[in-house]
Amino acid sequence: MKTILIVDDQPGIRLLLAEVFKKEGYHTVLASNGIEALRKTDETAPDAVLLDMKIPGMNGIEILKRLKAEKPDLPIMMMTAYGELDLIEESVSLGAVRYFTKPFDIFEVRDAVIQLLNP
């Protein structure tokens, strides 16, 4: 069973994404901040990460940099509010494989993750 780490400071988004991916047969691990995300990556070795760009404390770009430094092949997809184009470009240049703008279409996110994990 493949594992998806969902990193978002909003509990509702974490729970919604977790529910969607559990229904698809994935194991989900949830983190609400950067420190938790890094710790859970070490503990669970996820197959993919859904990472929010704006998280209090350590932002998504910093988390992305640290995850990519430790696990360069880990596919990371960013979630960001509409209009943060500079952050989107930076995240892609740092190795993010995909990004979604909030509010996102949950089915688009689901399908993209399934496609990424089951090529």
Image (cartoon, rainbow, N blue to C red):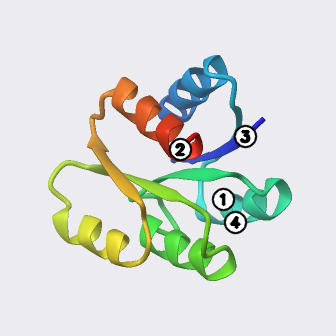
**Callout 1: helix, strand or loop?**
helix
Q: Which residue carries the number 2 mark?
A: 119
How crowded pointer 1 is (Cα within 10 Å; few <14, some 14-19, many 20+) is rated as: many
Residue at the location (25% across, 71% down)? 89
Q: Which residue is mark 3?
A: 2
- Looking at the picture, which amino acid does disc 4 mark? Leu
Circle 4 sits on which residue?
38
Answer few, some or many: residues within 10 Å of disc 2's Cα (few below 14, many 20 plus, some between 14 and 19).
Answer: few
Q: Position of residue 108 (x, y in %)?
A: 34, 31
Mark with earlier residue (3, 1): 3
Q: Is residue 44 above or below residue 115?
A: below
Q: Amino acid at mark 3?
A: Lys
Q: Specify few, some or many for label 4: CA neighbours under 10 Å numbering under 14, 14-19, or 20 or more.
A: some
Q: Earlier in the sequence, mark 3 or mark 4?
A: 3
Amino acid bearing label 2: Pro
Residue 48 image offset from top left, x and y in percent: 60, 51
Q: Is residue 2 left or right of residue 119?
A: right
* Residue 40 image offset from top left, x and y in percent: 76, 56
Question: Residue 92, can we see it?
Answer: yes
